[in-house]
Image (cartoon, rainbow, N blue to C red):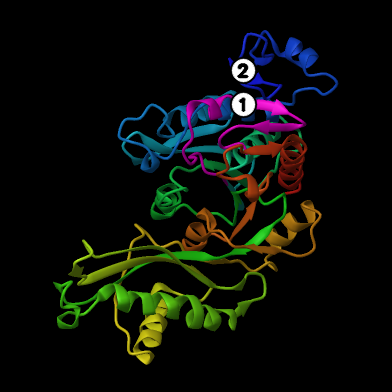
Amino acid sequence: MVCIRIDGSNPSPTTTFLRFGSNSLSSARRLCHPRTVTRTEKLLAELIALPSVNPAFLPPRHPLAGEKNIAEFLAATAARAGLEVEFQKVQPSRSNIIARLLPKNKIRQTILLAPHLDTVGADGRHFIPQRKNCRLHGRGACDTKGSVAAMLAALCELANSKSRPQETEIVFAGLIDEEHAQAGSRALVKNKFKADLAIVGEPTKLQVVTAHKGSLWLELTAHGRAAHGATPHLGKNAVHEMARIVDALETDYAAQLKRRKHKLLGAGTVNVGKISGGTQPNIVPDSCKILIDRRTLPGETEISVRREITELLRAKKLAATISSTKLAPAQPLETDFKLPLVQTFLRAAHQKTTLGVDYFCDAAVLSAGGIPSVVFGPGDIAQAHTADEWISLASLEHGKNLLLNFLKSLP
């Protein structure tokens, strides 16, 4: 049973709860008048109540960490709808959940619905779903348990529909680890999974996205020579060297990037997010490090970015060693919007043009693995990772219906 606090206040003896359970749905609807509780909303509430924080953000063996409970819940839900279910082990106690709806005839194409199951961190109160002002609040509500609910609800409804595709296989893949290193989507690709189109669940406000930026996290180290603080002229101050490098990156390099623009994504960016160097005031520092976030455009690679930074520093007579701090590359995405299945999905979403977004996601991993991929889902990315994450219930239900209509249109 899942409880939803509907007044949004802190728990108290007078707090009203909306309870979802096999014997209480009718009373829940009465409590929620004049609006009824849809199956999609009920499913999302149950998902929010199952913490699935990425283990990378919590201490070892933390009770809120991992996707196991939510994967098992989704597997049971999919099995009840008649879908073929399997777990794809990725890491210890962490598996992708894969549910298939097979057509009656020979498979001629495959559609992949691919939201992620993990969330960023939060304390326990964020896993009590709360409804207020036609929104559902809670960790993961939009990023991306809203997409999980909309996609699986659409697929389960389709499984019991007379309008099932006759030659199209539809696969739901709830992926682990998107928020950290995309291990779930990388495992799917490594195991040679193939599809003709992947719809990757992210909060896009129900707009079809065909391009997103990539992200490189680079560490730059300036090297100096230590000396006594009383005789600084005998040393070489690495902090001073790095200060000049930071200025070059945030001014000249940033201006250089603004001159290269993508039609959907605009320009790439650079951000110096952290600096550290030296040990104490009376020692000339012999080392200083910075961490930068470089958002990349399609066509840019880590090799090309390192090269242009090195050339910029060399031209200014500055020097630093460069290394990557990401476990795996977060590549940019660019999918041809003229592909027939993309065009079909655009029509189902009542959209004539596609969009680009600044953030990256599993779509680029799947695309690099040979699966044409778009990004789509209910909710607004502006709410993701916030202290009061929420999703519009109208967006949630509309998203489920758009997906269902698209799937019904397939051969």
* Residue 129's disc number: 1
Q: Is residue 180 magenta?
A: no
Report the number of discs: 2
State the image coordinates of residue 359 (x, y, percent, origin top left).
Answer: 56, 59
- Please tell me which of labels 1 and 2 falls first in the chain: 2
Q: Can residue 403 be seen from the camera position used here? A: yes
Residue at far front of view = 230
Residue 3 shows which numbered tag?
Answer: 2
Amino acid under label 2? Cys
Label 2 near label 1: C-beta < 8 Å?
Answer: yes
Main structural element of the magenta stretch: helix, strand or loop?
A: loop
Q: Is residue 63 above or below residue 150?
A: above
Quadrant location, the N terminus: top right
Name the side, left or right, on which 71 lies relative to 80: left
Q: Nearer the viewer, residue 62 or 262?
A: 62
Instruction: Say what amino acid the circle numbered 1 marks.
Output: Pro
Provide residue 285's location: percent of width, then percent of height: 21, 70
What span is colored magenta in the figure?
114-141
Task: Please name the residue shown 44% across and 74% down the image.
Answer: 301
Q: Quadrant of residue 318?
A: bottom left
